[in-house]
Image (cartoon, rainbow, N blue to C red):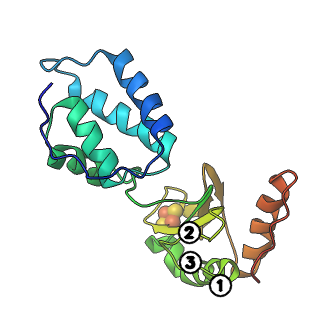
Amino acid sequence: MARVNPQPEERVLPPELYAQLDAFIEELHISPDDARRKDTLIQVLHKAQGLFGFLPEELQLHIADRFAVSHAEVSGVISFYNYFTTTPKGKYRINVCLGTACYVNGAEKVLQEFERVLGIKAGQVTADGKFSIESLRCVGACGLAPVITINDKVYGKVQPGKAHDILEHYLVEIVGEEVPLYA
Ligand code: FES
């Protein structure tokens, strides 16, 4: 199949993950005239993010090429859905809600405390790759404001002083590993 997009000069992501992604794409039997191709593209992006953790440009180009669509089309889908990310995240993704209900109940201080305890800012990942912090708008649990989520788990009525306890709980769950908190 002719390439639609220029390929990056050098790939830095693991070849074995590309192989897994390609095997997944093969099983989908994508045809250029399939009306459900966009749905399939979203499905592949989910798979790719699950494998690689994020969707950087070299991966976007690869997927665009497999679908014979432009890079712009793939990046457009990625930027449309909040779920997709083009930057690496931690093993534990902390999202602090800064929607109105959470904000008026002190979410900004909660965010600052998580940043202080982990020694990173929102949008960053800890050096060991374990935690990343993001902010988002309303997760639909306003009655529990202020709210944070860590991966799929929701924490309500989070006070800034609880940041350390919540994070410590995650470190205990990392069996056999002792990772000191930065506080
Ligand atoms: S504003 Fe935070 S859950 Fe709605």
Q: Quadrant of the N terminus?
A: top left
**Residue 148 coordinates in the image, percent (x, y):** 60, 64
Does the residue tagged 1 have its C-beta within 8 Å of any atom of ligand 1?
A: no
Task: Please tell me which of labels 3 and 1 falls first in the chain.
Answer: 3
Q: Which mark's residue is nearer the viewer, 2 or 3?
A: 2
- Rounded to the nearest angstrom, the CA distance separating label 3 from label 1 is 14 Å
Residue 17 point in image, percent of width and height: 48, 37
Mark 2 or 3, nearer chain start: 3
The residue singled out by tag 1 in the image is 116
Local crowd size for mark 2, using a 10 Å CA cut-off: few (<14), some (14–19), many (≥20): many
- Label 3, on which residue? 107
Dot 1 crowding, Cα within 10 Å, few <14, some 14–19, many 20+:
some
- Image point 12% across, 38% down: which residue? 4
For marks 2 and 3, give the CA distance. 20 Å
Relative height, residue 152 to residue 127 (above, below): above
Kind of residue sitting beneath label 2: Val
Quadrant location of residue 28? top left
- What is the C-alpha distance between the residues marked 2 and 1? 13 Å
Describe the element under mark 2 as helix, strand or loop. loop
The percent coordinates of residue 63 (x first, y second) are: 28, 37
Q: Callout 1: helix, strand or loop?
A: helix
Q: Position of residue 176 (x, y in %)?
A: 88, 53
Q: Are marks 3 and 1 in contact (CB under 8 Å)?
A: no
Residue at disc 3, secondary structure: helix
Q: Which residue carries the number 2 mark?
A: 125
Residue toward you, 134 or 32: 32
Return the residue nearer the eye: 112 or 108: 112
Q: Earlier in the sequence, mark 2 or mark 1?
A: 1
- From the viewer's perspective, is residue 9 above or below residue 28? below
Rendered position, 121 above or below 87: below
